[in-house]
Amino acid sequence: MCLLTPFNMLLRLLLIGLPLTSCSIPVVPAGTFTTNCHERHFWLSVKGSFLGSMVQFYIEDSTGVHFLSSQRAAECGYTVVLNHRGNLVFRASYLACYVENRGDTEFRVSVRFVNMQTDGSVNAYPFMLHCSLVGPWSLREIVCEENYMEVSVKWPIPIVSREGVKWLELQSQTLEERVKQLRTGQVIFYRPGDFDKTPRQIEDVKAIGYHITATDTRILLRSAYSSLLSYTIKEKNVQVEAVSAIIILQLEGTSPIPVEISVACAKTKAVVDGLYLLWSFPLALSPLVRGWFRTGAMRLGVDGRVLSDCEMRDRGYNVSLKDQTVNIRIPFDKEGAKIKSHVLKGQYAQSLSLEFFYMYHWDDAIWLHTQHRSFLLLRTPYMLRTPIVLNNTDPLTEMFSVTLGVFPADVSLQNITLGRDTMTWTEAKQHNIHLKQILFSNGSHAYELQVPFSHPMVTQRVISGHFRRQSLALTFDLVIFPEEEHFSYRTNVMFDQKEPALSAVLAGSCTERGVMVVLHYGSEDVQWELYVGDRRLDWELVQLGGYRLDGGDDHFSVEIPLYSPGIAYEDLNLKSMIVKVEVSAVNMVTLKAEHSLVQRCTFPVRDFLVCLPEGRILVVTDTTRSIPPTKPNSTTLLDTSCKPTATDSSRALFNFSLDSCGTTMTVEGNYLLYENEIRYSQKFLPKEDPLIHMDSPFRLTLQCRYPLNVTSALTLHPTANTTIKHPSLPQELRQGLNWTKPLSRGLRITKGLKGL
Ligand SMILES: *[C@@H]1O[C@H](CO)[C@@H](O)[C@H](O)[C@H]1NC(C)=O
Ligand SMILES: *[C@@H]1O[C@H](CO)[C@@H](O)[C@H](O)[C@H]1NC(C)=O
Ligand SMILES: *[C@@H]1O[C@H](CO)[C@@H](O)[C@H](O)[C@H]1NC(C)=O
Ligand SMILES: *[C@@H]1O[C@H](CO)[C@@H](O)[C@H](O)[C@H]1NC(C)=O
Ligand SMILES: *[C@@H]1O[C@H](CO)[C@@H](O)[C@H](O)[C@H]1NC(C)=O
Ligand SMILES: *[C@@H]1O[C@H](CO)[C@@H](O)[C@H](O)[C@H]1NC(C)=O
Ligand SMILES: *[C@@H]1O[C@H](CO)[C@@H](O)[C@H](O)[C@H]1NC(C)=O
Ligand SMILES: *[C@@H]1O[C@H](CO)[C@@H](O)[C@H](O)[C@H]1NC(C)=O
Ligand SMILES: *[C@@H]1O[C@H](CO)[C@@H](O)[C@H](O)[C@H]1NC(C)=O
């Protein structure tokens, strides 16, 4: 916390409403007028809202009522400005004309503020401002006001000669005598390197805007800026305007006494330095410094109030000295500074302004103590400020929530556009769109907009199997008052919503060729391995069984042909067979079979031979193709007791195990070869047939070949005729697969297994 400085506590305010005319003074809302005593100035401010179409100030003293024209104000020490907040500020130097000055310590001035309304009515408000000096006058005091420069020096006057500085005591003189001496005195104006030796009469320079006068204890020079005899120099890269003058006093009985009375003011503009407003000025103003220079303390004030060191620290102000230049950095967005909005090249821009007061003092060889005060209305150039969009979209609420800001009070949202739908505030409300202005305690504001995902202008797009992207194009149309400048701010908001997880699915179907199994990946990113029965689907199995693989972004399929490994024969008769395929999908990370499928398919039965891994042979064959045709129910195997398990008019079905029915076994390389025969059984020769054939009219050799080492391996041989061969790989599979892949590896089945 900051404590008020003694300076602030000692401020004395006085506002006396004195009706100067007989007409009654209208009632004024509280806070309309504020008065202040500010170190060396009377200070009166009038609320902007109270101001009429025209205002005037009159000063009244014993000699009459004086109208303050702008020229008169500058020469006399009065300043009237509209400050950055739009309030009217009236400031008067304690040493201004018409001020009742008691010994340079008590000051009174009678001010009349005239407010003219547009309807023609005129009201006058009289004030008697009264201030007492707080803090003694320095030998020299300089004021750089908005409209004038002022310097006052104290009697006694330093007299510089070759021997050094002497002080001329003039105690005996009265004020009248001094004023009279000044009137008759002369003044020499000069510029560096250009000494105009022709003295001018002090009386005469009044006509060209130089006000030179004396008070009880001081001599004073005041002029407006850019006066006839002023000059500008560059000091540390900063424009400095100066008036250099020497007043020559002719005192009785002495030789003429020169009094150096110069004034200089830095004319710096505030600039933006990052997040700071930067104001720089040279520490020593050369027209004012003689001999050695020693800098003293400084004070800063904002909005007419001097800040303590503690307050400056709290507000983040930074005063630094670099290369004999004082740099004052005032952070943006701090109280005191005011933001003005503007549109620059179609974009939003801001300027920062500040009512600034700066005082510092120094000592030098002649003027042992100088106080230098500046009053400035700092305003930065406009710079682009991109509004900030805060995205508070909460997926749980299923709506976009966006905040746009922060804007000062002069910005107002007019309408919003969602996609191509432009609407005003009221229309937004009708469309059930939540639009709200959020007000901050510092007077700035932001806008909050909420649009449900279900709004027709919200576009939805699936960006991957997992996400649905909701996006919304937003345009905010804003306007700046009072200029009614328009600008727009466009932005896109989006939200990627996770689709509800879709788990993988195994599906089966029957095809002409066999059984089709499809793994739909769903939305999970899982690597799968498929098992057909208890055998892992690997390239060896694919090759062996002539499986057809296919795949896409979202699925993987395998077609298991009839009679290939993996097919189980559940029911077999001469008309049809029911085959069964058991497939499971194993998650390669958890190694768990997460999905499984049993697919059954019924196929019509034609001739075939299957060697089952469990050591059993199934055969269906047409026996009527022999000449003469053989009746199926009259056939047997080598062991004639092994009859067909079923027959119809043309075909016989045999189902027998390898160790029965006279099956023989021989070793052929790495294979075991099992053989049997279906033959015509003599027993059933028709009695009426007189011819007895030596050879059996029907004979069919059956062969099954099993690898020697892996007895459990499947070797199933589809066959259309009796010749049994180890299956070879279908041509189409050869082309589709890369045989350099290690055969022992399972197929890692994940999305994007294209081209299989
Ligand atoms: C003040 O500004 C100067 C120059 O930018 C910097 O070096 C210094 O650290 C600042 N001081 C503080 C307290 O921020
Ligand atoms: C006003 O307050 C808001 C919210 O705290 C802040 O974001 C903004 O920067 C402040 N603006 C000013 C000018 O102080
Ligand atoms: C939206 O605001 C802009 C700018 O203020 C204005 O030009 C336009 O006419 C408005 N549109 C609608 C539909 O109100
Ligand atoms: C807005 O917020 C949501 C939710 O936090 C986030 O998914 C999205 O990426 C954000 N950005 C934009 C530009 O919408
Ligand atoms: C073949 O015979 C065996 C033993 O009787 C029996 O278990 C099996 O189901 C039969 N196979 C078919 C396809 O009918
Ligand atoms: C064999 O089948 C034929 C006709 O299909 C039938 O006439 C005959 O009786 C059957 N013989 C035996 C022994 O079942
Ligand atoms: C089994 O025999 C086949 C055919 O000769 C051979 O390629 C394979 O390596 C053998 N396997 C084992 C485990 O011995
Ligand atoms: C049986 O197979 C052999 C060899 O594959 C072939 O030459 C013959 O034509 C086939 N016979 C019949 C009846 O299909
Ligand atoms: C098979 O794979 C090997 C090794 O990855 C590669 O060099 C070769 O080109 C592939 N062949 C085909 C036909 O894709």
Image (cartoon, rainbow, N blue to C red):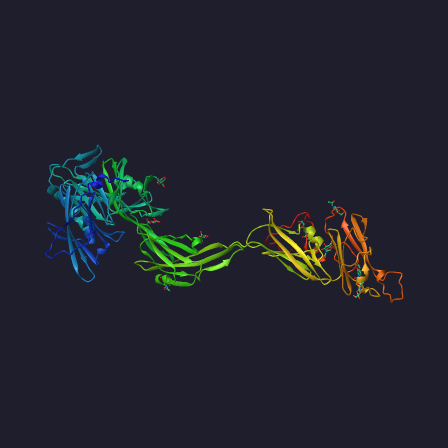
Q: What residue is drawn where x is 23% and y is 56%?
A: 49
Residue drawn where x is 22% and y is 41% of the image: 8
In the rendered image, residue 495, in percent from the top left (x then y), is placed at 46, 54
- Left or right: residue 217 compared with residue 295: left
Nearer the observer, 61 or 590: 590
State whether residue 209 appears in this view. no
Which of the 4 quarters of the picture holds residue 620?
A: bottom right
Above or below residue 755? Residue 334 is above
Comparing 500 with 40, the one in front is 500
Left/right of residue 530 with respect to residue 413 in the rendered view: right
Image coordinates of residue 13 in percent, x first then y, are 18, 45
Would residue 187 be found to the left or right of residue 530 on screen?
left
Total labels: the figure holds 0
* Front one among 652 and 402: 652
Q: Which corner quadrant holds the C terminus?
A: bottom right
Residue 373 visible? The answer is yes
Left or right for 74, reference 621: left
**Where 206 sits versus 9, above or below?**
below
Res 549 → quadrant: bottom right
The percent position of residue 85, horizontal first and vertical second, equals 27, 52
Quadrant position of the N terminus in the picture = top left
Find residue 388 and report its horizontal and vertical position in percent: 39, 52
User: In the displayed image of the protein, which residue is found farthest to the top?
Assistant: 163
Pick the front one: 2 or 355: 2
